Amino acid sequence: MTKVLMKGNEALAEGALLAGCRAFFGYPITPSSEIAEYMARKMPKMGRTFLQAESELAAINMVYGAAATGNRVMTASSGPGISLKQEGISFLAEAELPSLIVNISRGGPGLGGIQPAQSDYFQATRGGGHGDYHIIVLAPSGVQEMMDFAMQGFDLADHYRIPVMIMAEGTLGQMMEPIIVREPVTDLPPKPWATTGCKGRKPNIINTLHLSPEFLEERNLHLQHKYKLIQEREAKAETFMVEDADLVVAAFGLMSRIAKRAVMDARQKGIKVGLIRPVTLWPFPEKAFQEAAEHVSKFLSVEISMGQMVEDIRLAVNGRVPVEFYGRIGLIPNPEEITRQIMKIAQQEGWV
Amino acid sequence: MAEKQILFAGFGGQGVLSMAQFLAHAALSAGMHVTWVPSYGAEMRGGTANCLVTISDREISSPLTENPLMAVILNRPSLDKFESRIKPNGTLVLNTSMVDRRPQRTDLEILEMPMNEVAEEIGNPRGANMILLGAYLQKTQVVQVDQALQYFEVIFKGKSQEIIERNREAFLAGVQYAQNNW
């Protein structure tokens, strides 16, 4: 199979097109803009719709409208833009409209900077907008996965009727790696709920206003039931050298590959250390951590933030094992830096 | 081949990203694993730009490092910033046209070329970065020169034949420079 060298943002955009994305609505922001640029170049030629909205708010509401027609649609932005989209995402979640939302993330709070970050983890995994909802959050670790997760993201979105977010550090959007370009998807699932014109059938109504207290509760219980199912079926993690580990490092996204290097280097120094990489951030792969907690003496969460995923690990292991944290923002921790953290813990624990 | 990480750094507009991209394409064409990570920021012409390329015969875990094995440095601010970070006994390739001091490290293999003057001499000032890259590959064989040459058409896909030839000419001038001087 011939591989082509592609930028993460472009691979993601191409993946979305291969998955049959019919419309893209967005507003440019660094470091996500190449996605919109790629779509602007490609989509009109394919007879599909690229639209630069007047704002992020408009873009996410266009996603709502277009998703309601049963088409595969998406938007992409970065931190500050994703914040602006939260109201719309809450609406998408309640209306159960399948859609793909991409956050090529940068450091906040506020306008922050344009350097890569993972500090939108809370926003992504806790719902972000108002109300009791979740969206599926996928965290790719390389350019191939930028393409693959875009495709899988649409499938998950359609299957569960849920917005899916891909969250990747800015660096992953900007970096290039050789990838295998996948085959286009030809069979899309039917969407009998979509508003496609009701001639000859009962009208489909897509609405999020529920003034009846009983019906509001019913809707919420329905969503919770769906979320539970997703938690049972879709939580995903990759593990590396965890079996005999005393210490397990946890990291997601591109950061997980940097951490993997550090784990390999620390193994060379004789430290029994492994890695858990959550692939889905929501649902959080609790099981991987609970199983490891049976035999490890410590976890170390490494993030490009001031400490967010570390809370989910603590919830997962529920006090059984201490969970430490190392993170930076503005700069990405280097493998050498993480190895030093591992060695520091190894010294404290008396392993060296 | 063990994993090699090569840092390219200079002013924006010197062709830092594109020479690194050429190397990434050449490595891919030669069947190796490769990653290309640009520093992206509020960069502009005249600002600083750098880019890290990792090449390996195995799957690459981290595309980032604190200590690259080799650094190709095109200007003085980049030398000041990155000299201390190169791996012990690593390689430092210097564009002496834009660097007015000697490196302080004594453990490094130092390869110097007045890149801009050489480019002027052969009447190809815009190909300066490719001259240095040709020389660098000839000396280090990070990717075989023959292989890189073979894939010129692939690497510059979509560019005019004239641009491809100008770049090839510059690259070969660099190969020759390395043979004569390094």
Image (cartoon, coloured by chain):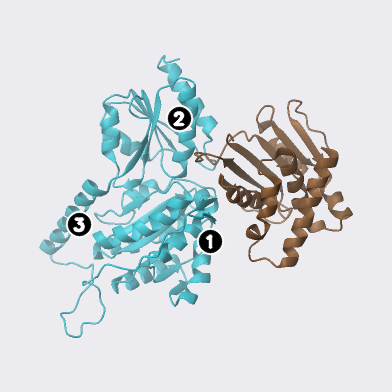
Subunit under mark 3: A
Q: CA distance from mark 3 to mark 2?
A: 39 Å
Labels 3, 2: front one: 2
* In front of the other: A8 or A144: A144
Residue identified by numbered label 3: A223
Labels 3, 1: front one: 1
Residue B66 position in % (x across, y down): 59, 34
Element carrying mark 3: helix
State the count of labels: 3
Residue identified by numbered label 2: A263
Residue A30 position in % (x across, y down): 54, 57
Residue A223, by quadrant, is bottom left
Contact (CB < 8 A) between labels 1 and 2?
A: no
Contact (CB < 8 A) between labels 3 and 2?
A: no
The answer to whether residue A112 shows anywhere in this view is no
From this view, report whether residue A33 is shown above or below residue A169.
below
* In front of the other: A65 or A43: A43
Kind of residue at disc 2? Val
Mark closer to the chain start, 1 or 2? 1
The structure residue drawn at horizontal position 75% and vertical position 45%, both measured from the top left corner, is: B74
From this view, report whether residue A173 is shown above or below residue B75.
below
10 Å crowding of disc 3: few (<14), some (14-19), many (20+): some
Residue identified by numbered label 1: A34
Residue A287, by quadrant, is top left
* In front of the other: A249 or A134: A249
Q: Which chain is cyan in the rendering?
A: A
